[in-house]
Image: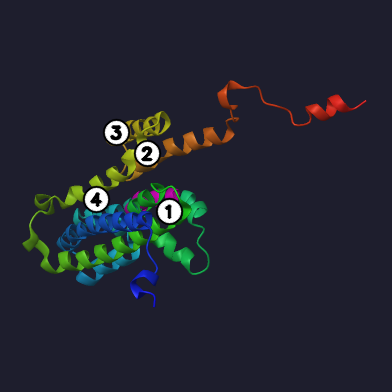
């Protein structure tokens, strides 16, 4: 008689590693939702308005931009414009993820909603298509659940939490994101794109509205991608390209 433990399907070590990485990023990012919940209520939004922002808008930078403008006395359209400019970067991510994930049917709107900095980073950090899809869905789902739960906690507790930066919550998401991207910055081209994007963002940061530096920095990566697409492929080792029809031409009488 076979052992039921031995006959049970086993998860490959790589899939287990991707899932562990995804959950770690999801929890680290979601914890910072406490800060958003507290800041949103302090800016004058109600509990349900705060919950709706996290569930429907669901992009941390845009949410903080929105409540920041509202808390400073800005109008609703101004807050919406700031949030939109910051959230537009997710559309850039979607262009790349669409060809990688290929969602179909009811998965398409859900995939669009879960397209974030973190889910994109975990997905593109994987080598196999199956692992890319796993990393995206597990990370996106983990961030969504943790972020919304922590938003409620922050909104309910409010100012009693104090400054979230004292707990290091403001740095956890950025550190996790950088850790995922760091292995991909070993070649010269990704390094040049990263440096160019940082320089562009720093130059325009003092002079343009919030959110615009992020979009301008993203244009650096798009410009490099466009140049690579139109660049002719170089032969390996500097060899001269071979015309497949050359031999046929020589054999003709």
Q: Which of pointers 1 and 4 indicates the residue nearer the eye?
A: 1
**Is label 3 in a helix, a strand or a loop?**
helix
User: Looking at the image, can residue 247 be seen?
Assistant: yes
Q: Nearer the viewer, residue 131 or 224?
A: 131
Cα distance between the residues tagged 3 and 2:
22 Å
Q: Residue at x 29, y 37 (%)?
A: 205
Task: Name the image quarter holding the C terminus.
Answer: top right
What secondary structure is marked by label 2? helix
Badge 4, how many Cα within 10 Å: few under 14, some, many 20+?
A: many
Label disc, if present, on residue 184 of the rendered structure = 2
The image shows residue 180 at horizontal and vertical percentages of 31, 45
Mark with earlier residue (4, 2): 4
The segment highlighted magenta reads 83-93
Tell me the tag on residue 132: 1
Of circles 3 and 2, the one toward us is: 2
Label annotation for residue 202: 3
**Left or right side of 132 for 102:** right
Q: CA distance from mark 3 to mark 4?
A: 21 Å
Is the residue marked by circle 3 packed among few (<14), some (14-19), or many (20+) residues within 10 Å? Answer: some
Residue 38: which quarter of the image?
Answer: bottom left
Q: Earlier in the sequence, mark 3 or mark 2?
A: 2
Q: Secondary structure at mark 1?
A: helix
Residue at which label 4 appears: 173
Residue depicted at 70% across the width and 27% down the height: 242
Mark 1 and mark 2: span between their CA atoms? 15 Å
């Amino acid at each position: 008689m076979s052992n039921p433990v031995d006959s049970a399907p086993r998860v490959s070590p790589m899939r287990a590693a991707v899932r562990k990485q995804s959950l770690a990023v999801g929890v680290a990012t979601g914890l910072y939702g406490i800060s958003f919940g507290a800041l949103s209520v302090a800016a004058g939004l109600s509990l349900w308005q705060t919950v709706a922002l996290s569930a429907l808008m669901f992009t941390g930078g845009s949410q903080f931009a929105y409540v920041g403008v509202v808390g400073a006395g800005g109008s609703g359209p101004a807050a919406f414009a700031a949030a939109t400019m910051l959230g537009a970067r997710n559309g850039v991510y979607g262009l790349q993820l669409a060809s990688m994930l290929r969602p179909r049917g009811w998965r398409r709107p859900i995939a669009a909603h879960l397209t974030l900095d973190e889910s994109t980073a975990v997905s593109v950090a994987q080598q196999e298509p199956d692992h890319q899809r796993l990393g995206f869905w597990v990370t996106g789902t983990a961030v969504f659940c943790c972020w919304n739960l922590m938003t409620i906690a922050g909104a309910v507790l409010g100012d009693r939490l104090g400054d979230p930066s004292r707990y290091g919550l403001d740095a956890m998401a950025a550190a996790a994101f950088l850790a995922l991207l760091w292995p991909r910055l070993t070649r010269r081209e990704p390094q040049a794109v990263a440096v160019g994007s940082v320089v562009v963002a720093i130059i325009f940061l003092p002079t343009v509205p919030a959110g615009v530096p992020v979009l301008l920095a993203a244009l650096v990566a798009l410009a490099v991608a466009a140049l690579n697409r139109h660049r002719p492929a170089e032969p390996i080792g500097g060899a001269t390209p071979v015309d497949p029809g050359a031999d046929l031409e020589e054999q003709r009488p």
